[in-house]
Amino acid sequence: MLAASCVSQSPEYPLSGLSVGERPEPAVPDGWVAVRIRAAALNHHDLFSLQGVGLPADRLPMILGCDGAGTTDDGREVVVHAVIGDPAAGGGDETLDPRRTLLSELHDGTLAETVVVPARNVVPKPAAFSWAEAACVSTAWLTAYRMLGARSGLPRDGGGKVLVQGAGGGVSTAAVMLAKAAGHTVFVTSRDEAKRALALKLGADAAFASGERLPARMDAVIETVGAATWSHSLRSLRPGGVVVCSGATSGPNPPADLARLFFLQLSVVGSTMGTRDELAGLLAFMADRGLRPLIDDVRPLADVRTSLARLATGEIFGKLVLSV
Ligand SMILES: NC(=O)c1ccc[n+]([C@@H]2O[C@H](COP(=O)([O-])OP(=O)(O)OC[C@H]3O[C@@H](n4cnc5c(N)ncnc54)[C@H](OP(=O)(O)O)[C@@H]3O)[C@@H](O)[C@H]2O)c1
């Protein structure tokens, strides 16, 4: 089958370790299912894997990809849930299982004609979603959903003030749309004026240059950019506010600014992916509100190198999809 694999790793030249070609059809262990992928989507995670972050070299070659949607052997149309973990081992939450992995970290991922996952790792695809739309939700959208929901402390019935850093990313665009749909006031930042304009079109109430002082203090910040925006995130919170962090694209070690943290009684909360139940809840919420993932580009899987190169530049707005 055709697949996009990580065969070697380079922090400087991540695409040098990408191989797009034939791989053997996977075996299906007991209790697992094969999904014939119809569309898959890229995440920054795929670039990190090619850079040697989060994917040990002794596991190569590894088929990349966390996001995908397709059909099972018994004809079900499904979205793949990329968190491979045991809810019981995580106190009822598989994302907290100490042995949890994401697809493409220990088990081959979705950038392939077929992926094999535990039977619980598929959820029904909403009929109204295209394959491309369905392929976008299980990483960036799920992450944004958990950040805003279980992790942020924002009121369930809306009315909160939330800042989303780095308007163009997959998690960020999802966070803007989900937060607006939930009834919050949403501010965004971006380095790029065109992305700020697009974020306003997505529904953001106001858009600011990265680092710009905001006219109001936020209840919560959705942070995935990391070092480049971290101090601004802390400065933007009201006393008692929460920064929810699920990524660090620009670097993981900014100054902690501990004086601000304790004096204003801020909370720093980590978040990663979401549970199978949260994925089902997200799909139901999106179907109910008529929300669809923002797609920047769709091209064939054979062209994945072009899409990964674009992701590496950061010059994207929404998700990059591969049709399979
Ligand atoms: N923990 C999890 O479960 C989870 C799940 C999904 C993603 N993530 C992580 O979240 C991060 C975002 O991933 P993604 O796939 O949504 O997209 P991405 O490609 O990492 O994000 C692109 C955005 O990051 C911003 N950015 C990048 N470098 C920047 C810099 N030096 N200064 C300011 N902004 C910068 C850019 O915003 P502007 O150009 O608009 O300024 C750009 O639009 C990644 O680190 C990823 O690994 C984590």
Image (spheres, rainbow, N blue to C red):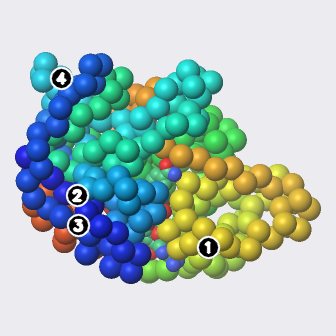
260 shown above or below 276:
below
Residue appearing at x 53%, y 73% in the figure? 250
Q: Is mark 1 within 8 Å of ligand 1?
A: yes
- What residue would you read off at disc 2? 5
The label on residue 227 is 1
Foreground disc of the pair 4, 3 = 3
- Along the viewing direction, whichever of 241 and 276 lies nearer the viewer: 276
Given the current orientation, which residue lies at the most extreme right position?
Answer: 263
Alpha carbons under labels 3 and 2: distance apart = 6 Å
Q: Residues within 10 Å of mark 3 (few under 14, many from 20)?
A: many
Mark 4 falls on what kind of element? loop
Is 93 on the left-hand or right-hand side of 202? right
Is 183 on the left-hand or right-hand side of 54? right
| Residue 177, image x, y percentages | 44, 51
Alpha carbons under labels 4 and 3: distance apart = 31 Å
Identify the amino acid type marked 4: Arg
